[in-house]
Amino acid sequence: MEWGQVHALLGENGAGKSTLMNVVYGLIRADSGEMQFDGAQVQVHSPQDAIGLGIGMVHQHFMLIPPLTVADNVILGQETARAAGVIDGRASRRTVNELSRRYGLQVDPDARVRDLSVGVQQRVEILKALYRGARLLILDEPTSVLTPQETEGLFQIVRGLTAEGSAVIFITHKLGEVMAIADRITVMRRGKVVASTTPAESSQADLARLMVGRPVLLRVEKGPAQPGRPLLQVDGLSVLDDRRQVAVDGLSLEVRAGEILGLAGVEGNGQVELVEAIAGLRPARSGRVMLCDHEVTAASPRRRLRAGLGHIPADRHRMGVILELPISDNLVLGDFDRPPFARGIVRLLAQVRDHAARLIKSFDVRAAGPQQLAGALSGGNQQKVVVARELSNGPRVLMAAQPTRGVDVGSIEFIHRQIVEQRDAGLAVLLVSSELDEVLSLADRVAVIYRGRIAAVLQAGEIDRDRIGLLMAGGQADQVPAASEGAL
Amino acid sequence: MRAALRIAQQAAVPLVAILLGFLVAGVAVAITGADPSQAYLGLFQGAFTNKHAFTESLIASVPYVFLGLAVATGFRAGLFNIGADGQFYLGALGGVFVGFSIHGLPGIVHIPLAILAGVACGAVYGGLPGFLKARFGAHEVITTIMLNYIAYSLSDYLINRGPLGDPHSSAPKTPFIDPSAQLPIIFADSRLHLGLLLALLAVPLMWFLIERTTIGFRIRAVGLSPEAARSSGISVARTMVLVMAISGGLAGLAGADEVLGVSHFMPPSFSIGYGFDAIAVALLARSNPWGILPAAFLFGAMRNGAGFMQLQTQVSADMISIVQATVIMFVAAPVIVRWLLRLREVPAESLQITQPEGVGAAPKT
């Protein structure tokens, strides 16, 4: 790769992108092969070596200390100290200010990291790398936690960096981003480079084919919805967030049998709280939740499960699967204590294993077997385990929150197809996603959430990208022309 | 063959830790001017080869089995029960009370009744901090430590001035239990009692409970990921109370077993830190019920042999505390042992999985 360029490293989860970059950054040692940097052969045994060479990395999960200020986080480990080891606060603030001006990274050096949005935290991570003299910046799945606006902001930063002569490696599996930002593209599959190309020479469909080794349907094929009676009704629901602020504010919505209602919105507008309240993981302050004609507003998660709710949680690692348990156990998390998986208090492990073997096959989970630990699976396959479990319980309402976040293209396709199939089988599906493309391609109706309320519900004929974009940003439904010229 | 290899792999770190423990304690003994080899010879003789030494080591191991299981069960649910010592006291109080206050029962009724009383007392006393955690979020480490002191003071009061004191004795103690409540001797010409068989039975039972029942699955799921467990409909609060009650019940069983099988009465300061040693036993066994057996036997044998060692070589019996402490240090820091053994594993794959979520990971929005 060359200086002043953005080099996208594209591949499905498990293709080896992150592993390769961890080798470059010195976190993992290579078994064989060599690495050249700036024309010379180099040995990188630790992140310190990498930093010394001018390589910086921003991980998917940020490595920041929330109670400290931006400036403190940036200088941490390489503090400018005055006599007797006292940190020179003014000097560090000045350095941070200079860096942020130079690269167009607006951050208040005195703000505490815990008060910052995810997008700004990411800027702090980039500043950290630049402060350490990074000329080659590795961004590992940088947009997976960002809103569309924040993603655009990140792209500007990346362009600014390359204009200054730095090089950026952009790890991603999102095709649209690659086309928008990359100068060169390297596609990886199963640990091998399968193609090296440029956006001009290729199309999204080409890249997708290269990533998965076969053509992928980017558009979901589905017939028109045939909605039946409402199965999930939320009526005037208010919910508080962790800081005891109103996050869901008198919200009402209704999902009918045989339709997919897409909930679009910028993250942080109450989606998480709404989903948790419907699942029974967070108390409702007021309002009602009806599930298949039963009121479940105060019911336990278990009772909602039994009443017919399937829930694909947004945070797979925290709530979806237990990484240290085998796939078979993860597939019965909801009914391990019921027949046929238990008799009395004794678990029937043979049944659990058979059940797992069946689901692994029908949901195409790429695993060594039912006893493999969930933590050893790729993100996409972990998510298939979650989907398989939630659908095998025979739900009548499926609530899918960010069902394809951090999931490879092949699995996305599979999961989308499952969701549409379930709709056709008469399930009511509530799809909560921050990926507008996902909502647009799956939903039969789209509800836009803004500050804890439904800003508008668009019927099949009215769904329009720009209009939804404006509603997501807080525009009024009646002020938004059906075909606006304004871009998001 | 493969199973044997797996066991060997799991046991490697604890075994090396034990060896290092004896090595470090030996150095400490040498620094004091005594001969470590003589000290260890004394320890060995006191634990195994003297008259009655072996059966006495077994007797001393019995409470460690129950208490080790108690602490290990808590660990499996992610709970740190430091209150096993207090629950041990409560179990002893319950057992001794039923043992001396009820008369005329046949042994086959009296013994189970007294044991059940001990288990129940321990379970309630252990369940309490579980409830406090589930209901109010009070951390179990704090509450169980505090409850230990309450248990000590309570038994002190009950035995010294309260209803459990022996009116016919000048020394503060409870009355002797009826012979019908005494655990029968199972090995002629020794003090080895039925408790050993109970302990040997408790291990597979606890293994079955943890690994093969729905209760155990709940416990493990809550220990591994409370949020995923909750989101799948497992009641985390109920599981916490339950697991602490099971843990306390096992500790109570240890206490009852000790009064019914060994002392046959209860003095005010009954335990000498059994409940705390049990934390070490559980750690050494890596919370695996089967591992509790050898770990408990090691601690029982050391405790039994230490007295003779001191008599023989003037090396303080507290020397075994150095062994225990060092063992725990090396078990808790397996990296050191792995490095010594050159057990290089940590493949790239697992590095990925265990990568920390990052201190500044994206906040919940």
Image: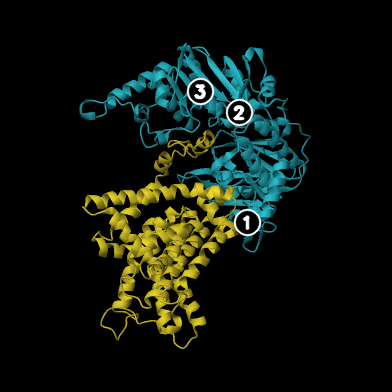
Chain colours: A cyan, B yellow
Q: Which mark is residue A15?
A: 2
Residue located 70% across and 57% down the image: A340
Mark 3 is surrounded, within 10 Å at the Cα level, by few (under 14), some (14 to 19) or many (20 or more) other residues, namely: many
- Subunit ID for the residue under disc 3: A
Q: Chain of mark 2?
A: A
B153 vs B24, nearest the viewer:
B24
Q: In x, y percent, where is residue B244?
A: 47, 61
User: In the rendered image, which quarter is residue B170 located in?
Assistant: bottom left
**What residue lies at 29% left-to-right and 62% top-to-bottom?**
B309
Q: Which residue is mark 1?
A: A303
Tag 2's secondary structure? loop
Residues at marks 3 and 2 touching, judged by CB atoms closer than 8 Å: no
Q: What residue is rendered at 61% in x and 18% in y?
A: A179
What is the number of callouts on the image? Answer: 3
Instruction: Compare marks 2 and 1 and give the one earlier in the sequence.
Output: 2
Q: CA distance from mark 3 to mark 2?
A: 24 Å
The one nearer the camera, A20 or B187, is B187
Q: Secondary structure at mark 3?
A: helix
Identify the subunit bearing mark 1: A
Return the x and y of residue B65 as percentages of the image width and height.
Answer: 45, 63
Q: Residue furthest bottom?
A: B104
Q: Earlier in the sequence, mark 3 or mark 2?
A: 2
The x, y position of residue B346, in whole percent, is: 49, 37
Look at label 3 and name its amino acid.
Answer: Leu
- The nearer-to-camera label among 2 and 1 is 2
The C terminus of chain A appears in which quarter of the rendering?
Answer: top right
Question: Can residue A155 be seen at all in this image of the molecule?
Answer: no
Q: Residues within 10 Å of mark 1 (few under 14, many from 20)?
A: some
Q: Is residue A37 left or right of residue A453?
A: left
Residue A154: image tag: 3
Three-letter residue code for mark 2: Ala
